[in-house]
Amino acid sequence: ILTWQQDRFVFNHPGFHAYFAARHLFELYGKSHPSQFGEAKATQLAAVFLPDKLLQQKWLEVFLLVAAYLDLTDNAVKPVDNQAQFLNVMLQHADRMSTQQPNTATAILTACTLARSEVIGRNSQLKSALQRRLETFFNNREQMRRNTPPRITEAGYSWSVLGDNRRSVHFLHAHSAEFCFIPAGEYQSATERLIIPYAYWLGRYPITQKQFNEFIRDRGYQTERFWPEVTERNQWQDGPILNRSQQPHQQPKRYQEPFNLDHYPVVGLTWFESLAYSRWLTEKAHQYRWLPENWQISLASEQEWVKAARGGLNIPKEPLIEPLNKLSHISPTVEVMLNPEPTRVYPWGNQTQPHLANHNATNLRETNTVGCFIDGRSPYGCEELCGNVWEWLRDQARGVRFTKGGSFIEPDHMMQIDYRKRWHGLEAHKYIGLRLALFPSDI
């Protein structure tokens, strides 16, 4: 705990440094009667963290501790929103810095959101202010581009914790998941030119925890018709399915935050669970007439996935992206142009950088809320096809199943469009998720 430095003992662990720094700041600015804190002291306290201390993890810890102290009350005094006052002052600084210092502004916004104590629950205005700013940030592609991947993914994490209220990104529920239209036609595979003679749609994002939880709540694990492959193997037991260790389970493997947050990709599920989810959603889509009876929802084939990632020889001039429950036409006519890079290695081109996908060079070491890597999208508008999580394909060969796209822990070459990885269908890991496709049932 203690080390000897220049004739004095010091605490070695950074947690102690943060604690004593926060306590000192609280003694200076916040340890008064709650009603005496005021805007002046909030401004003085905010100045300690400006302009850019919150870019450092050690100062973020101090900030969160100070914010928590401000929410303390003595005796039975009715609480005053000193924390909210302090956070609002910080947010005003973030607004002023958003153009010239976008990384710092985003760090402040993230820190304020992470300072989520009881005051955010009590103060709906503060929560709304944070949500508005986060929505503005994620809808402003230029501001996102001026931030680093850690800043963007931290903002996504804090928004997921606070409650992601995005209106413009329809992934909040399974029925409003967005899909990207892919016209019929030729594309270039790894070795030859191929054709997919039908149009189809591929999910804009991987399926999220929130979307998969709807399947669980709707007793999807207890509905035998969604599990034909599992019942054939005698691995479905009136609800639970048996994993590779012959242990029953009724939900994907659970991992700690951020893997279990609503708007992060669902992970820890087998190939069989992915197919069951797609059958459940197909049934819902037919029931509510979102999808024609002669179309279905399932995992993409490898050919469909590759074309969606690389683009056909011709690609739409503008991506057509629509939510499942509001498809304007199942097979629309779109204006196309020649694909400038029909043999591209990645969905975005031939080179990769940390800001284009969540992989090992990005050094996040965990999944991210979907929608953080906007410049990594494919010609059709599909985002995060590479990086973040591997995606199950519906193809199988001699008992082997396949995934595409790499994940947050993989090197560059595993994200390449033509790379695929083999698995046992009952394997489940925190780096494997799923993405859905819509296509004609007679395929």
Image: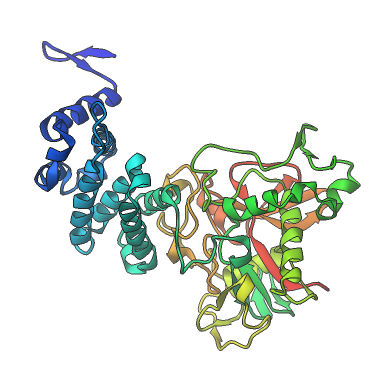
| Residue 354 figure quarter | bottom left
Which one is nearer the viewer's eye here, 136 or 119? Answer: 119
Q: In the image, is 12 to the left or to the right of 291? A: left
Which one is nearer the viewer's eye here, 90 or 312? Answer: 90
Q: Quadrant of the N terminus?
A: top left
Percent position (x, y) of residue 374? 44, 64
Where is 20 relative to 171, above or below?
above
Q: Is residue 406 visible?
A: no
Where is 400 relative to 383, above or below?
above
What's the residue at 20%, 45% (across, down)? Answer: 86
The image's colouring method is rainbow
| Residue 206 figure quarter | bottom right
Q: Quadrant of the C terminus?
A: bottom right
Q: In the image, is 145 to the left or to the right of 94? A: right
Percent position (x, y) of residue 236? 84, 42
Percent position (x, y) of residue 190? 65, 66
Where is 148 relative to 27, above or below?
below
Which one is nearer the viewer's eye here, 419 or 242? Answer: 242
Percent position (x, y) of residue 277? 72, 55
Q: Is residue 381 visible?
A: yes
Question: How many numbered circles does the render carry?
Answer: 0
